[in-house]
Amino acid sequence: MFIVDAYNLAYSTGRATTFEEAYRLVLELAHRLIGKGYRVLFVFDGYNDTPHPRYIKFAGERRAGMSADEWILEYVKKHRGETIKLITRDKALAERSRHLHPNLLVIDPKDFMRFANDLFESTSTPMMKEVIDTYDIQMRMLNDIESFLESIKRKKRKKRTKR
C-alpha cells in the first residue's frame, strides 16, 4: 500500500503549484498505479465537497481542521499489520510514522516519481486522457454554477438597493 502525502509529492517534485495541478497529477498517478495492481491512497489537507474517487482522501472529511499528516498518522497506526510505503519528504511525518509502524518504508517523492515514470513507460493508457478531461469538465461546470449563483446574488443586491 502506498500512502501519499499528496501536496508534498506535488510541490516537492515541482509537478504542481496549484491544487488543480496537484489533483490532476494524483489522478494520473492513481489511474496508472491502480491499473498495474498497486493499492494507493493520496491524502490532501483540507476539505472538498465535490465528488472524488475513493483513492483520494481529504483529511478534513474525517474531522474538521484535520491535517493530512494527522490523517496519515491515524491510518498508519490502525494498519500496523500491513506493509505501507509512505511517500513524503516531511521528516517529522516520516519519523512519527516510523514510530507508529515498525515496518513502514518512507520513500522520497522524487524517487517515487522515478519509479512511477519507469512503470508508466511500459504502460499505455488512453483512458487517462478521459479521466483528466472528465475532471476538467467537472471543474468548469462547478465554476459555471458558482458564476451563475453569484450573478443571481448580484441581481438581488441591486434590487434591494433600488428600493
Image: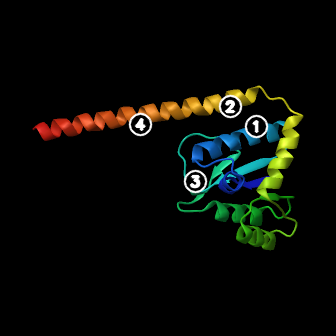
Tell me the CA gap for discs 3 and 4: 22 Å
Separation of marks 1 and 4 at Cα, in angstroms: 29 Å
Which one is earlier in the sequence, the residue at label 2 or at label 3?
A: 3
The kind of secondary structure element at disc 3 is helix
Pointer 2 residue: 131
Q: Is residue 1 visible?
A: no
Q: Which residue position is annotated with label 4?
A: 146
Q: Separation of disc 2 and disc 3 at Cα?
A: 23 Å
Report the disc number at residue 129.
Answer: none
Q: What kind of residue is marked 3?
A: Glu
The type of residue carrying mark 1 is His
Residue 33 spot, x, y in % from top left:
81, 41
Q: Which residue is mark 1?
A: 31
Please determine whether, in this image, residue 14 is positioned above or below residue 52: below
Helix, strand or loop for disc 1:
helix
Residue shown at 60%/56% (left/top)? 45
Q: Does label 3 or label 1 sit earlier along the sequence? A: 1
> For mark 3, what is the residue?
61
Measure the alpha-carbon separation of dots 3 and 1. Answer: 22 Å
